[in-house]
């Protein structure tokens, strides 16, 4: 008797894919190759077959040899799958090379809601400086060491790790990353574009850190900071700032 329950040939499930966002300010192959060599500092496995999205807004007027561009990034371990901020007239050509057009919706200034004037109540206590308020924030908690080759992604949440993140490991969060142990691998906070995300660790010896797609590596050594104090990493403008969390005496 034939089994009436047949196995589906295709099943569709929701999957989260993390991609490296790369902002191009140069367009020629030699310039891009030089920049990639500078980022990776000669480390052959700096990127490990990761997906990449190229943001070409700053060089959208330039002509790209897309097969050569993709081959160049592939040689550095990055698989270009999408292009962001391409001109409308170039999008069909880009799609012709098997690339996706990654649409980014931007809020125009005239669309921004205007503040409503209201009477300020008289303060009954000293006014405090403005604080970032986050409500209903979820968190993923990891209690075991993150070993080389492992990748952990806290989608839509903060990531809290109570054990070491070893060399070759990668931890990613859409929110902030809190590591109550040494960070020796790679940490990427604000993966979905949250520029207010931060990275905290008791000991900082990272291979790479990133906030909202902006990277910093430490091939020349980590900044000298007071010993035995936690360290925080945050984004100031377009730069990654590293500072000690030593409390004032």
Image (spheres, grey):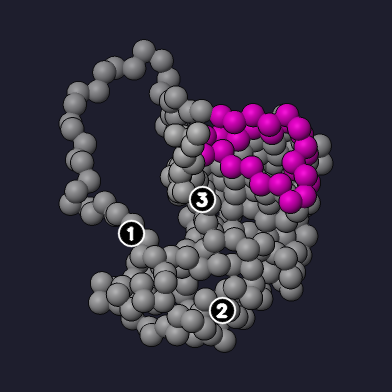
Task: Decide: is 28 above or below 176.
Answer: below
Residue 233 appearing in the image: no
Q: Which residue is mark 2?
A: 71
Q: CA distance from mark 3 to mark 2?
A: 21 Å
Left or right for 58, reference 184: left
Q: CA distance from mark 2 to mark 1?
A: 23 Å
Q: Which residue is mark 3?
A: 17
Q: Which mark is residue 121?
A: none
Mark 3 and mark 2 in contact? Answer it, CB < 8 Å: no
Q: Earlier in the sequence, mark 2 or mark 1?
A: 2
**Residue at left offset 64%, top offset 29%:** 141
- Residue 205 drawn at (x, y percent): 77, 50
Q: Earlier in the sequence, mark 1 or mark 3?
A: 3
Q: How many labels were placed on the picture?
A: 3
Q: Which residues are magenta?
A: 139-166
Q: Residues within 10 Å of mark 3 (few under 14, many from 20)?
A: few
Mark 1 and mark 3 in contact? Answer it, CB < 8 Å: no
Q: Earlier in the sequence, mark 3 or mark 2?
A: 3
- Residue 210 drawn at (x, y percent): 59, 53
Q: Which residue is mark 1?
A: 103
Image quadrant assignment for residue 100: bottom left
């Amino acid at each position: 008797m034939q089994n009436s329950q047949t196995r589906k040939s295709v099943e569709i499930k929701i999957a989260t894919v993390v991609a490296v966002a790369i902002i191009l300010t140069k367009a020629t192959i030699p310039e891009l190759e030089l920049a990639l060599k500078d980022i990776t500092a000669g480390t052959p496995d700096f990127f490990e077959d990761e997906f990449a999205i190229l943001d070409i807004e700053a060089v959208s007027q330039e002509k790209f040899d897309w097969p050569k561009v993709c081959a160049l990034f592939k040689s550095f371990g990055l698989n270009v799958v999408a292009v962001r901020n391409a001109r409308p007239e170039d999008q069909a050509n880009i799609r012709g090379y098997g690339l996706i057009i990654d649409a980014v919706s931007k809020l125009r200034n005239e669309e921004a809601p205007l503040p409503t004037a209201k009477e300020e109540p008289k303060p009954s206590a000293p006014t405090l400086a403005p604080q970032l308020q986050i409500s209903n924030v979820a968190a993923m908690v990891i209690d075991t060491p993150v070993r080389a080759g492992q990748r952990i992604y806290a989608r839509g949440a903060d990531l809290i790790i109570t054990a070491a993140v070893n060399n070759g490991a990668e931890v990613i969060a859409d929110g902030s990353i809190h590591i109550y142990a040494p960070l020796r691998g790679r940490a990427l906070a604000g993966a979905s574009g949250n520029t207010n995300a931060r990275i905290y660790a008791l000991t900082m010896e990272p291979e790479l850190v990133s906030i909202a797609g902006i990277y910093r590596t430490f091939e020349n050594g980590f900044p000298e900071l007071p010993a035995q104090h936690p360290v925080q990493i945050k984004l100031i403008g377009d730069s990654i700032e590293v500072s000690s969390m030593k409390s004032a005496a």
